[in-house]
Image (cartoon, rainbow, N blue to C red):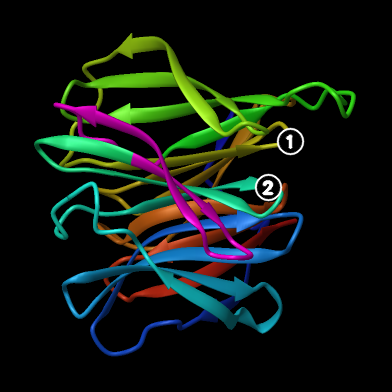
Amino acid sequence: MHDKNDRNRKKITCYPPKVDNDQYAGISYDTENRYIVTTVLRNYHQWIVQIYERKGMRLRAETSCPTEPKIQNSWYRWVTCLGRGYALISTGDKRQSVIWLLNLHNHKWSVLLVKQNATFRKASFHQSSRKWPENRQREGLVYVPDMKNKTIVTFLLDTHAWTISKIDEIKTTEFARELPITVNAKGGKLVVGYWNTGNVIFADLIKSTSITLTSVGPREIFSICFLDTLSILVLCKQREVVEMYKVG
C-alpha cells in the first residue's frame, strides 16, 4: 500500500560539496570503508572521482577518470561501489560505452569492458550473501541500462580475477534518456527517484509497503544510494548538494 504521508521522513543534513565549475553526476557508498564516492565534471572537460569520509563529508582523495577509451565529456560518468575498496565507473556516448574498475585505495584504473553501439548509464551490483570459502571465486551480477538499445544488460563479474562477461539482455521500451530514473536496493529495501517530479519513494519489499520519503523538486534528482537500510543519500543536480534522509 502506498502511503504519501511522509511523517516518517527525517532530513538529517545537507552537504554542499560543490566548488566552482564542478558538476556532480553520480554518488555511491562503500559500506566497508564508509566512503561516499562521487563523480564530478570539473571545468567542463575533466571527469574526476572524489572519495569522502562519511563522517562530516570530508574529502579524502580524488583521482582523474581515464581519457581512453574515448567518451565525450558531455556524457555522464556513473559510480557503483562494489565493496572491498573497489568501484565501477560506467559511461557511454552515441558511439560506444565503457566500464572501468577503480581501486579506491591506490587509485589504479583498469578497463573491464568496451561495447560498441551502446550507451551505458549507472550500473547496479548484486552479490550473494552466501559465505564462500577463501579458495572459491566470488561472483556478482552487474545490471547496466543501455539507453541506446533500450535494454538492461546483465553481466557476471568475477570479483577475484576481475573479469566480466555478458549473460543476458532484457529488452524494454520503458527507458528514455530524457526521463531518467535512479534506483537502489539494499537489504530488502528499495528506493526510487523520479526525474520529472523529484519524488523519492522508499519501499520495504518484505512488508510490501512504500512511502513518499521526500520530494526534492522537478528535474533535481540525479543519483541515489543507501548508507544503510534506513539512511539514503540524494544527489541534487540543480542545487548541486548531497542531502541525507533517514526513515523512522
What crowding class fits label 1: few (fewer than 14 Cα within 10 Å), some (14-19), or many (20 or more)? Answer: few
x 26%, y 58%: residue? 218
Work out whether residue 124 or residue 221 is closer to the camera in this orientation and state it.
124
The quarter of the picture where the N terminus appears is top right
The stretch in magenta equals: 99-122
Is residue 105 one of those drawn in magenta? yes
Q: Left or right: where does residue 172 sit relative to residue 94?
A: right
Q: What residue is at 59 percent from the left and 74 percent from the top? A: 52
Secondary structure of the residue carrying tag 2 is: strand
Q: Position of residue 227 (x, y in %)?
A: 67, 57
Residue at 55% over, 61% down: 233
User: Is there a contact, CB below 8 Å, between mark 1 and mark 2?
Assistant: no
- Could you say where residue 198 lies in the image, as x and y percent from the top left? 35, 54
Question: Looking at the rendered structure, which numbered label has been put on residue 83?
Answer: 2
Q: Which residue is mark 1?
A: 187
Q: Is residue 117 magenta?
A: yes
Q: Is residue 196 visible?
A: yes
Q: Position of residue 77 (x, y in %)?
A: 32, 54
Amino acid type assigned to the residue bearing label 2 in the image: Gly
